[in-house]
Image (cartoon, rainbow, N blue to C red):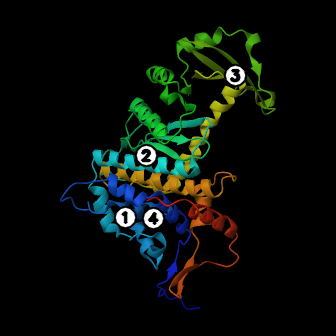
Amino acid sequence: MQVAFDEPRLVSDAGLLVTATLAERLGLEELVNESVWLGYGTAGAALPGRKVMTLVHGMLAGADSIDDMDVLRAGSTGLVLGHRVMAPSTLGTFLRAFTFGHVRQLDHVLDGALTRAWEVGAGPGDAPLVIDLDSFIGEVHGEHKQGASYGYTRQLGYHPIAAVRADTGEVLHIRNRKGKANTQRGAERFVDELLARVRRAGHDGTVVIRADSGFENHKLMRALDRQGVEFSIAIKQSKQVRAQIEQIPETDWITVEDYPETGQAQLAETKLGDWRLIVRRTRLVGPQAELWPDWRHHCFLTNRTVPTLVADLDHRDHASIELVIRDLKDQALRHFPSGRFAANSAWVVIAALAHNLARWSTLIGLPNQPVQTADTRRQRLLRIPGRLTRTARRWTLRMPARWPWQRDFTTVLDAIRALPART
């Protein structure tokens, strides 16, 4: 069998038609052009919309570096995307032109995109909006990455902070930070911006914020309480907290029934200041009990009024944010491609926009199906080979016969095409 790379109308990732159509319905390219302005005479400043959208679609196609964006220039992929595909060299110049202020302009793009997506059906509606806060280490390799340093994990990298919608996994807010930044660095301002963003997006119902003990900050909790925001935040076991736990009567502990037979779990609650202190204690039983014969305690503070068992179950579900972080690292945040901190910060926000665009596609098109991982979505809906043909002045994108997820693809595409176009 002979091999020849000579077919100009092939499209390696024809499924990007789905996200390109949604981006067009949301008016994302125009939103970027209106929001991002790098200044007169700045190299790479012209037409930022098509550059950001090239980065977004390249990330969705699996690119995790600037050079990998060249995959979009193969065959006729540009005709599927609906915008001109920019060269990697142009994209690198564009990213290096960013400063901190310009990254905040990209924040405005993420803000506006969220509002528009929720307007067309991706929002939480009247249901409570549960938001998970967390930070993670974006590992880098090289001594010339501006801002990269060693933090508590002893890995060289950056330390972004992210806020994620619990039920859909969309990134509501994200900000890159230096690698040595403390987990709580900038958290108060970050949460203020987050709450303002979800209100602008149209959600005026209950908001619940969950976080681990890295965000234990009583000033932040008081601010959330004043704003009527419910929270559930884990705390460290200080001397004061341990004293409160020891004062809980044995009769107050409630056994958790649905727990593995090899262990025991019990719940109780008390007060710490003005808030409920809910304590979960666990230990092993049976042959392995001598490994951990004593109770181990896990505590969190909350201002919620739900029953203790419900509060504990909901708080432990905070761990689902790790799945979103895994997805981000499985996509563009596997690497931070530039040596400049501001360029990598812009890359982080664009990566969140790409992640959300894919999530919104399936959320709108397949609302009753479980949330897919980034890899599953890429394999089933985006990474589909296709070929463009033209007859009677009409383009047709021909895809493989008997594609296993053909029905899902057509359902999503039809639902997105039915959305009103922005004028």
The N terminus: image quadrant: bottom right
Q: Which residue is mark 3?
A: 308
Q: Is label 2 in contact with label 1 (beta carbons under 8 Å)?
A: no
> Along the polypeptide, which appears first: circle 3 or circle 4?
4
Ranked by sequence position, the earlier of labels 4 and 2 is 4
Whether pointer 4 and pointer 2 mark residues with C-beta atoms closer than 8 Å, the reply is no
Mark 2 element type: helix
Q: Which amino acid, mark 4?
A: Gly
Q: Nearer the viewer, residue 332 or 396?
A: 396
User: Pointer 4: residues within 10 angstroms few (<14), some, or many (20+)?
Assistant: many
Q: Is residue 364 above or below residue 318?
A: below
**Mark 4 vs mark 2: in front:** 2
Q: Looking at this view, name the residue that lies furthest to the front.
A: 423
Q: Position of residue 365 (x, y in %)?
A: 63, 58
Dot 3 amino acid type: Thr
- CA–CA distance in space, label 3 to label 1: 50 Å
Q: Position of residue 326 (x, y in %)?
A: 55, 49
Mark 2 closeness class: few <14, some 14–19, many ≥20 residues within 10 Å: many
Q: Position of residue 363 (x, y in %)?
A: 61, 53
Tell me which amino acid carries mark 1: Arg
Q: Amino acid at mark 2?
A: Asp
Residue matched to label 4: 58
In the displayed structure, 129 sits above or below 21; it is above
Mark found first going from the N terminus, 3 or 2: 2
| Picture quadrant of residue 127 | top right
For disc 2, the marked residue is 111
Tell me whether circle 3 and circle 1 mark residues in contact (CB < 8 Å). Answer: no
The percent coordinates of residue 392 (x first, y second) are: 53, 88
Q: Secondary structure at mark 1?
A: helix
Q: CA distance from mark 2 to mark 1?
A: 18 Å
Sequence-first tag of 3 and 1? 1
